[in-house]
Image (cartoon, rainbow, N blue to C red):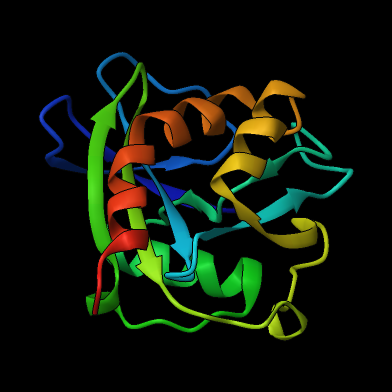
Amino acid sequence: MEWNDIYDADRNLTGRIHRRGSKWGPGEYGLVVCVWVYDGKGKLLLTRRAPQKSFAGTWENPGGAAQAGETSLQAITRELFEETGIRAEEAEFELLSSNRDHHYFYDHYCLKTQVPIEEIVLLPGETDAVQWASFDKVHQMIRRRQICDIIARQFLAEEEKLRKRQNAQD
């Protein structure tokens, strides 16, 4: 059973926790984190959701809900490792944006790293495939509805920032 911290509308911790899968109360919010992993050569890392997951078979970027007691950076570090086997330090992540919807705050990160596809370790029951995809391929996948809508909207909102980072010289 997974527990998540409950935040108020101003993103203050309330001191209460929420059991994952149960209904959120009025004015209660959780925290979701996700990361666009890019290689600095024009490609983004995508994972495919396992058959037993919601949005099964669609492609996405790594991420998930912060567990009770985790900061945003602790959560994204854990989620990335769980879903891909990629280890990164909190300081390596760059926050792209934060937003809020009806019951969640979302923190969108990016991380530059070059990991060969054969070194990616997928989490059974969570992900069943992985690929490095060009920006053009991501657009193609969005048009074909191979990327779920929420991730597609996130990509389109963050694309300019991601392209700038891909093209930046170290």
Instruction: Name the spot of residue 48 as percent of width and height, x first.
Output: 76, 50
Instruction: Name the spot of residue 12 as percent of width and height, x first.
Output: 12, 40
Q: Which residue: 69% across, 22% down?
A: 143
Q: Quadrant of residue 77?
A: bottom left
Q: Which residue: 33% across, 83% down?
A: 89
Q: On screen, 27 above or below 34? A: above
> Would you say 161 lies left or right of 19 here?
left
Instruction: Name the spot of residue 58 as percent of width and height, x first.
Output: 76, 38
- Front one among 101 and 133: 133
Q: On screen, 126 above or below 80? A: above
Q: Which residue: 25% across, 48% down?
A: 96
In this rendering, the count of numbered labels is: 0
Q: On screen, 14 above or below 72? A: above
> Would you say 68 lies left or right of 147 here?
left
Q: Quadrant of residue 81?
A: bottom right
Instruction: Name the spot of residue 108 as percent of width and height, x first.
Output: 34, 46
- Front one among 146 and 89: 146
Q: Which residue: 74% across, 62% down?
A: 130
Would you say residue 71 is visible in this rendering?
Answer: no
- Front one among 140 and 148: 140
Q: Quadrant of residue 102?
A: top left
Would you say residue 46 is visible in this rendering?
Answer: yes
Where, quadrant-wise, is the C terminus in this rendering?
Answer: bottom left
- Front one among 68 and 90: 90
